[in-house]
Image: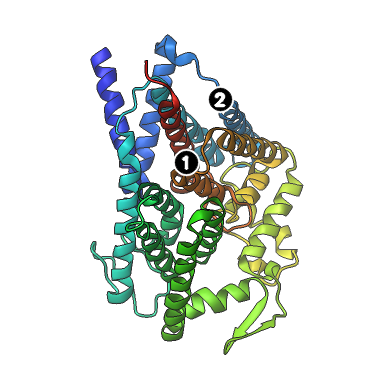
Amino acid sequence: MVFLTKNTNSSLSFIFVLFPILMITGPAIPDIFVSLSALYGLILYFTKTEYKNFNFYFFYCFIIFWIFAFTSSILSDFKLFSLESSLPYIRFIFFVALFIILLKYDKMQFNKYIFIVITLTVTFVAFDTYLQFFFRNEIFGNKIDLDQNRLTGPFRGDERVVGSYLSRFVFLGFGYLLYKFSENKYYKIIPFIFLLFVYICIFLSGERMAFILTSFGILLSIIFNYKSLKYFIYLLVGVILFSSFIIFNNDSVKNRMIKTTFEVIGFNFNNGKISKSENSFIDSHYGAHYITAFEIFKDNKFFGSGPKTFRKVCSNEKYSELDSKNIFQRCSTHPHNYYMQIISETGLFGILIFGLSVVFLISFSIMNLNLINPLHNGVFISLLLFIWPIQSTGSIFNNWYGVHLYYYIILIFILIKQKNLATTPSS
């Protein structure tokens, strides 16, 4: 039994290192890994006494959030449909629990390779996406039409998430490279070349929110790594030159990233001139999602309509009278914002508990990470970008999007463990 447990721990640790690669394959393989890890974590918890000493307050907050989400499903008009989403959500929580347990008892291996794999994987995905932009094809044969303004990279043709993927991992790779080369004047430019390479790729991907979030992340990175200010200036000059060249020579990118972005927020952009539009953000399809989600919350204040039910409830005829010029586009699989989704589908109780969990997580990170260290602040910035409330997002209950939050939590614990080992005197 000891031999089996040891080998299982090693295998799971190894697969965890490869997790950024698994994410490229689509939602199925990562979900299988998360689910099996969670099941194994439960088995360890109930069969091994030493693993029961598990006490992290935000972990219990996430458990309570799951309980409220589950309760929302039970009270929903679409019980079975909603339970398909809320019931298995607990796998994310015990996925985290397993790896925290393995770290605590020093049974998680391959830690030192995690950030190397992340950096190499991000570099590959960006390179592959550049190939697709210039040649309309990439290594795995995912072709795009000449008039298609959103790239897929190595992801399947119906999964246009390459910009989102890069934005969620880029600061992990940048932080690692800056940590490795910050003391070497000859190689210190390497992290910034990496960031420029990926940043421009996110711009080309056509994913506006991924580009905006990455821009915000660079601002945060400047604050945390102010000693490298001159290199950030070189980076920004490079971004301005490259993006300007692309905008002036590619109408598809210009329309997607500039013109359409201004239209969403209520402005017109024509011939380089910006003017106020008759439409506001509420008149966009995103605005229609948000006001519909808020109205659903108002009708189901305490427990919401139930996880995964926005797509069902939004079609109610009474929401067709809401004040948005695009109210006919109000329906989607989710409201495209984590917090609007949580408040509409789990109600006041759900959003309060989730918000409290996030606050505890941020406080825990600030108190235990060394935010002067580029590797540490890279993970912290990635976490902040994920939970930033003003953004369009996927579904928080979806495996591909939802797992990122819990992946960052595990990375935080890995860094804390390494920091504690480095500061503990040897006997």
Residue 79 x/y as whole percent: 58, 37
Q: Quadrant of residue 66?
A: top right
Residue 36 x/y as whole percent: 36, 30
| Foreground residue among 295 and 175 | 175
Would residue 143 be seen by someone viewing this image from the given angle?
no
**Residue at 60% over, 55% down:** 335
Q: Which residue is mark 2?
A: 56
Q: Amino acid at mark 1?
A: Tyr
Would residue 307 be seen by someone viewing this image from the given angle?
yes
Question: Within 10 Å of the Cα at label 2, are there few (<14), some (14-19), or many (20+) other Cα atoms?
Answer: few
The N terminus lies in quadrant: top left
Task: Please tell me how many numbered marks the rendered image carries.
Answer: 2
**Residue at 39% over, 18% down:** 44
Comes first in the chain, label 1 or label 2:
2
Residue 328 x/y as whole percent: 64, 68
Task: Tell me: residue 164, above or below residue 8.
Answer: below
Give the secondary structure at mark 2: loop
Point out the residue furthest to the bottom here: 271
Q: Amino acid at mark 2?
A: Phe
| Foreground residue among 301 and 191 | 191
Question: Within 10 Å of the Cα at label 1, are there few (<14), some (14-19), or many (20+) other Cα atoms?
Answer: many
Residue 276 x/y as whole percent: 71, 81
Q: Quadrant of residue 202?
A: bottom left
